[in-house]
Image: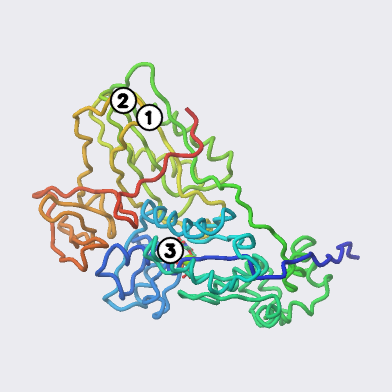
Amino acid sequence: MNLAHVPLAPVLRTRATIAHLDADAFFASVEQHQRPSLRGRPVLVGGVGPRSVVATASYEARRFGARSAMPMELARRLCPSSTVVVVPRFAAYAAYSDRIMAALREVTELVEPVSIDEAFADLDAAAGPGTDLAELALRIRERARELSGLSVSIGLGRSKLVAKLASEDAKPGGVRVVDPDDEDDFLLAMPVRALSGVGPVSAARLDELGVRTVADLRRQPLDTLVAIGGESGGTNLYRIARGWDDRPVTTVRERKSAGAEHTFDADLHGRAAISGALDRVVDSALARLERHAVAARTVVVKVRLSSFTTLTRSVTLPRPTSDEGALRSAAHRALALADVTEPVRLLGTSFHALSEHAQLMLPLDDDVVVADEQPVPDAAGPPPPPVPAGPVRATAAVVAPGLDVQTEADGRGWVVRVGDDGRVAVRFETAHTGPGYQRWVDPEAEELVLVAPLGPDGEPALLAEPDDTER
Ligand code: TTP
Ligand code: MG
């Protein structure tokens, strides 16, 4: 016996005024934008350890079969030797993401970011009765390119469900408007696994029943769907099959970071005291993180010295984790990068690049990406002292391909490779220089330092102050 109620059709919009925007090959496109020598070449962004996975592949690399979440080793084997592999740089991606979202916010306040490179927007108020929706979408796409330098795809539909499928259909770089009248033609031909509301288990069961397209799905009685997906899952499948999605675009801000910091009554002296104090700050920060029930990928440690110089250092893990041990040890690594030699008056720890689920299913990988942040000027407190805020030396032990570095002689560049002899191959270029030259730098003989990534405007991209900090 089955008690599920047949759902009623919701009232849907009469125009395709929900937009879904998604950047094309996001991480890889940022790398190609900032590093002119990578444009037009296969680029793989991800971990570089033996068990690492691909976060994303540029479209050039996808031509050879490279895909997100594929083992990096396999992707390397599929791609030609000209392929470039770099580690992710979250601070840069966050800065580009802000600019892409700004292109939507110029049109409407009703913008709902759903991931770092993806957002819904409600264009209903912005698009008067005579507005050509396709033209409006093209304008947003051009504006996103102007502000960020990146290619994005935009889909419009009368629901989030259809808008998302439409942007996927428009990739790369296109605009697709699915008017309500054309919705069934568009939806019924879609493979069931393309639907974001259908999990892999349900998709496999549906496949066993010969249900491959949305048209097949629509023919299934509610009872069958409930037997497959449970009451709420089955009812949801029933709705999806009919395009019955009346979820509004909501602007409740998602939490981007959580952390804690503490100013000590008396300055801390010595490594053991500082490390012990960091553990207590990490405990508070973990409690904050837990409140939001999410995993984090980037751990930032902030250290204010007795001279009032503030240093921040960050460690980015190859995937989001909620493992307390892994997050704690990342915090200690970040502290070690700050190379503290003075008494400490404040310690902070914050978790960034939060996610609820995203990549938790990816295989474990102990590869760690180390990134450096510029010293942050203090808003409060005495004027900045003349003490230099020790740059992090880019020795072979801390660099990884893709990280930003700088030498006195050549300026800014990025790590291409780390040699067995400890030398580092660096290509010196930025978004505005054109393709640069490459040379081997011996960090033992010459000063090579880690520097913060740049945003789309060429300004250093820093991870924002945590938006939930316990003080
Ligand atoms: P996506 O938008 O899914 O992918 P994409 O932008 O790289 O490519 P597409 O043109 O198909 O949209 O994800 C956005 C970014 O999130 C992506 O560039 C890298 C990151 N990511 C991961 O780190 N791991 C993953 O498994 C996926 C799917 C994405
Ligand atoms: Mg994308």
Residue matched to label 1: 347
Q: Specify the farthest residue to the front.
A: 130
Q: Give, as a three-letter code, the residue at label 2.
A: Val
Q: Give, as a three-letter code, the residue at label 3.
A: Ala
Residue 135 image point, x, y percent: 53, 73
Q: CA distance from mark 1 to mark 2?
A: 7 Å
* Residues tagged 3 and 2 counted as in contact (Cβ below 8 A): no
Q: CA distance from mark 3 to mark 2?
A: 37 Å
Q: Give, as a three-letter code, the residue at label 1.
A: Leu
Q: Earlier in the sequence, mark 3 or mark 2?
A: 3
Mark 3 Cβ inside 8 Å of ligand 1:
yes
Q: CA distance from mark 3 to mark 1?
A: 32 Å
* Residues tagged 1 and 2 counted as in contact (Cβ below 8 A): yes
**Which numbered dot is residue 344?**
2
Would you call the spot at circle 1 few (<14 residues within 10 Å), some (14-19), or many (20 or more)? many
**Which numbered dot is residue 261?**
none
At x 66%, y 76%, the residue is 179
Residue 189 image point, x, y percent: 66, 83
At x 10%, y 53%, the residue is 409
Of 216 and 96, the residue lying toward us: 96
* Residues tagged 3 and 1 counted as in contact (Cβ below 8 A): no
At x 34%, y 49%, the residue is 461
